[in-house]
Amino acid sequence: MQVIVFASSKGGVGKTTSALTLSSVLTHHGAQTTLIDADPNAPLAVWAKRFPDSVPQGLTVKTAFRTDVADIIDSAADPYVIVDLEGSRNEEVSVAIGRADLVLIPMKGNRLDADEAVNVIKVIRKQESIFRRAIPFRVFLSQTSPVIVDRGMRDICKQMRENGIPMLKTGMVERAAFKAPFALGGSIYDLNEREAKNPLAAITNAETFAQEIRDILIGTNVRAEVTTHA
Ligand SMILES: Nc1ncnc2c1ncn2[C@@H]1O[C@H](COP(=O)(O)OP(=O)(O)O)[C@@H](O)[C@H]1O
Ligand SMILES: [Mg+2]
């Protein structure tokens, strides 16, 4: 089981949207996935309840309340478990990060978001010391323009690199197709041109994003095995 946790110290950066998108790609390619909604506002649980017939096959949506996120993660039986957290720093966030095989931190590409990302990394470091294990994480760009890469964003990425903060090569571009499933049900794979412009571009973006994450998870497993046998 691989536990992927989306975390940020504030809301609105793209955790929920990216969590649903990643889950959609994994299930579309046949990987059973549990999506845990650990946000008290329950956006994913609401989506699943509102459109029960279009929840992708192989996707199980569960809700976690303040105290039981660890139990919900541990009781999941699927190869992928994706946790969508509330955008704040609380006990539940720390607990979920403590269970993660990979923490993903979205960032919109401005200075403030970069500082927020550093706050999450502090929580990760703390959990690493409590659990005495490395917790892999990546920051990724969210809601970026599909056409423009502005100077400020390039500078921030450069600074992240210089500070040794690992970033995903693939970001989640700003596209109506990523929002549409919340209004229409289902996933990016169910959209037509009328419902959202260029759904195929969104699918390509999402699949590249998911592939990079799978590669990271495989890589961390290989390293873990090497350490065990050493
Ligand atoms: N890749 C994206 N493309 C278009 N809109 C997005 C994208 N990611 C997030 N949004 C929009 O930005 C807002 C915040 O996103 P959300 O995923 O709810 O963030 P969070 O879970 O971090 O609070 C929502 O209105 C959502 O529709
Ligand atoms: Mg959210």
Image (spheres, rainbow, N blue to C red):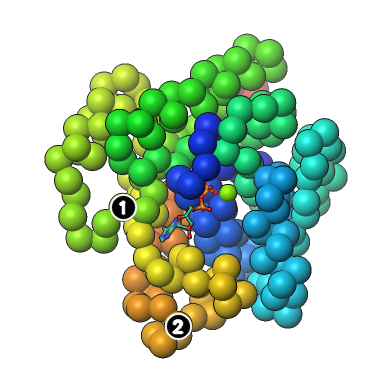
Q: Earlier in the sequence, mark 2 or mark 1?
A: 1
Tally of marks: 2
Compared to residue 80, the image places residue 162 above or below, namely above
Q: Locate residue 155 relative to residue 186 in the image: left or right.
A: left
Classify mark 1: residues with Cα within 10 Å, few (<14), some (14-19) or many (20+).
Answer: some
Residue at the (74%, 75%) spot, across then down: 52
Identify which residue is drawn at 54% across, 80% down: 190
Quarter placement of the C terminus? top right
- Looking at the rendered structure, the secondary structure element under dot 2 is loop
Camera sees residue 206: yes
Label 1 near ligand 1 (CB < 8 Å): no
The disc label shown at residue 195, or none? 2
Residue indicated by mark 1: 144
Considering every residue shown, the one lying at the far left of the view is 151
In the figure, 134 relative to 11: above or below?
A: above
- 6, 227: nearer the viewer: 6
Which quarter of the figure has residue 40? top right
**What is the distance, in whole Å, between disc 2 and disc 1 at their CAs?**
21 Å
Q: Position of residue 53 (x, y in %)?
A: 73, 80
User: Between residues 91 and 135, which one lies in front from this camera angle?
Assistant: 91
Residue found at x 41% / y 78%: 196
Q: Is residue 221 visible?
A: no
Asked if residue 42 is positioned above or below residue 68 in the image, the reply reads below
Mark 2 Cβ inside 8 Å of ligand 1: no
Which image quarter: residue 95? Answer: top right
Q: Which mark is residue 116?
A: none
Return the x and y of residue 138 as percentages of the image width and height: 45, 35
Quadrant placement of the N terminus: top right
How many other residues sit within 10 Å of disc 2, few (<14), some (14-19) or many (≥20)? some
Amino acid carrying mark 2 in the image: Glu
Callout 1: SS = strand
Q: Position of residue 35 (x, y in %)?
A: 69, 54
